Amino acid sequence: MTSRGSKATARTSSEARAVARTQTLIKGENGIGTVRKTTLPGGLRIVTETLPSVRSATFGIWAHVGSRDETPALNGATHYLEHLLFKGTARRSALDISSALDAVGGEMNAFTAKEYTCYYARVLDTDLPLAIDVVCDMLTGSVIREEDVDVERGAILEEIAMTEDDPGDCVHDLFAHTMFGDNPLGRPVLGTVDTVNALTADRIRRFYKKHYDPTHLVVACAGNIDHNKVVRQVRAAFEKAGAFKNPEAEPLGPRTGHRALRTAGRVELLGRKTEQAHIVLGMPGLARTDERRWALGVLNTALGGGMSSRLFQEVREKRGLAYSVYSYTSGFADCGLFGVYAGCRPSQVHDVLKICRDELDRVAEHGLPDEEIERAVGQLRGSTVLGLEDTGALMNRIGKSELCWGEQMSVDDMLARIASVTPDDVRSVARDVLGRRPSLSVIGPLKDKQASRLHDAVA
C-alpha cells in the first residue's frame, strides 16, 4: 500500500509540475505594451507583446543555436539549416509554404547569427493563425530531403560569393577572425565553400534534431494579438508534430562562460582589386550582460553613431577622406567587440587610420566633454524608440531578450537606463575599452610599402 501510494503521489507531483506557467512580465497601460510569458510543459517559452492600435502581427521562433555552436567541420550548418526549413515539411512543399503567406500579403524570412537563429512572419492580425501554423510546421516538421540539400547548396555558395563580392561586408568577417582566430566566433556565419560542399543531409538532420528541441526555442509574437489564443495555437501546432518529448523538461537558460580573445595588435590584410580600401580598427568590447553596456552605447554614439559624431566630423566633414565611417559594438554572451569602420581610397588608408587611432586614444585618455555626452544620450534615446515602431522590431526585442537575457525590460526602463548614464560612466568605459591596444583588418589593393606600414596603426 505504501509503495502504491508513493507512486501515486509521485505521479501527482509530476502532473502538477507539467502545467503551463503564465506570468505578466511588463504591465502596460490599458493592455498596450503588456508583455506576457507562458512556459509550456516540455520547455517551450512563448512571449507576447500586445499592441491593439495596429492591424498587423509578427510571429517568430528563436532557436538557441548559432554559428558558434558549430565544430570546424560543421561551419555553416546553422545557416544551411535555416535555408532548408523553407524547403518543405511532411505537410507542405516549399511552394505551399511561400504561397500560403503570399496569398495573404504576408512577409516571411529568417536570419542566422553567431548565437541564435530566428524565423518569422508578419501578417494582418486576422491571418495570425495561418502564420503560426506555417512557421511552427517549418520548425517542427522539416523533412530535409537529400535533393533539397543538393539544390540549396548552390544557392548558399552563391550567397557566399555575393558576400565576398562586397568588401564592405566581408571586412567584418575578417575582423571577427582577426579578433577571435579559428574558433566558432571567428568563423563566418555562412561557412566557407569547402565546409558547405562537405555538409551532408545526414549531418544536417542530426544538427537539426539536437538544436531544435522545444527547450531550445522561444516563440515571440507582437501586435494586435491575444496572448492566450497565441499560446493555444502554438501548443496545438507543437503537439500535432509530437514535439514535446518530455513534459518535465525545462527551458535552456541564457549562454554563460568566458571567451578569451586573441592577443591585441594583430593585423590582417586581404588583398583585393577594389576601388576602395575597407578597414576595421577595433578592440575587445563588453559582453551583452555587462552593466556598463549602457555607457558603452552612449560612447559609441558620440564617437561614430551619427553625422555629429567625432569620427564622422573628423574623417568625412573636415577632410573628406571617406564617405562611410562609423563605430559599432557587438555584444556576445561572454565577450564583445568595439570597432571603427571606414571605406576610403587606398592612398588615404594611413591618413584615415591615424585620425581614427588618434581620436580613440584622445577619448580614452581625456574622455568626452559633457555636451557631447548629453547629445549622445538624447540621440540614443530617440533612436531606441524610433527603432521599435513596428511589430517586427517588437517581436525581435522580446524574443531576443528572453533567449539571451532570460528577462524583459520595458521601453521606459531602457530609456531610464540610458538617461542614467553619467559623464563619469562614459569616461570610465572609454578608458577600459578604448585604452586597449587595437587590432586591424583591411581589404583592398594595398601595395607592399603601404601594407608594411599597417602595423603602425596598432603599435
Image: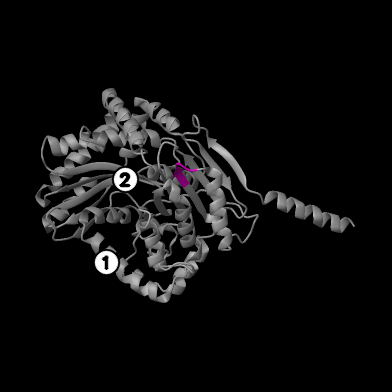
* Residue 151 place in picture, x, y as percent: 34, 73
Q: Looking at the rendering, which quadrant does residue 174 occupy?
A: bottom left
* Residue 27 place in picture, x, y as percent: 52, 33
- The segment highlighted magenta reads 221-225
The relative height of residue 100 versus residue 306 in the rendered view (above or below) is below
Question: Which circle marks residue 37 in the picture?
Answer: none
Front-most of 119 and 418?
119
The kind of residue on which mark 2 rests is: Met
**Residue 396 within the segment the image draws in magenta:** no
User: What secondary structure do most residues of the magenta stretch adopt?
Assistant: strand
* Residue 12 place in picture, x, y as percent: 76, 52
Answer left or right for 251 relative to 377: right
Q: Residue at x 43, y 45 (%)?
A: 395
Assess disc 1: are there few (<14), some (14-19) or many (≥20) residues with their C-alpha within 10 Å of its C-alpha.
few
Assess disc 2: are there few (<14), some (14-19) or many (≥20) residues with their C-alpha within 10 Å of its C-alpha.
many
Answer left or right for 229 relative to 340: right
Question: Which circle marks residue 283 in the picture?
Answer: 2
Question: Which circle marks residue 158 in the picture?
Answer: 1
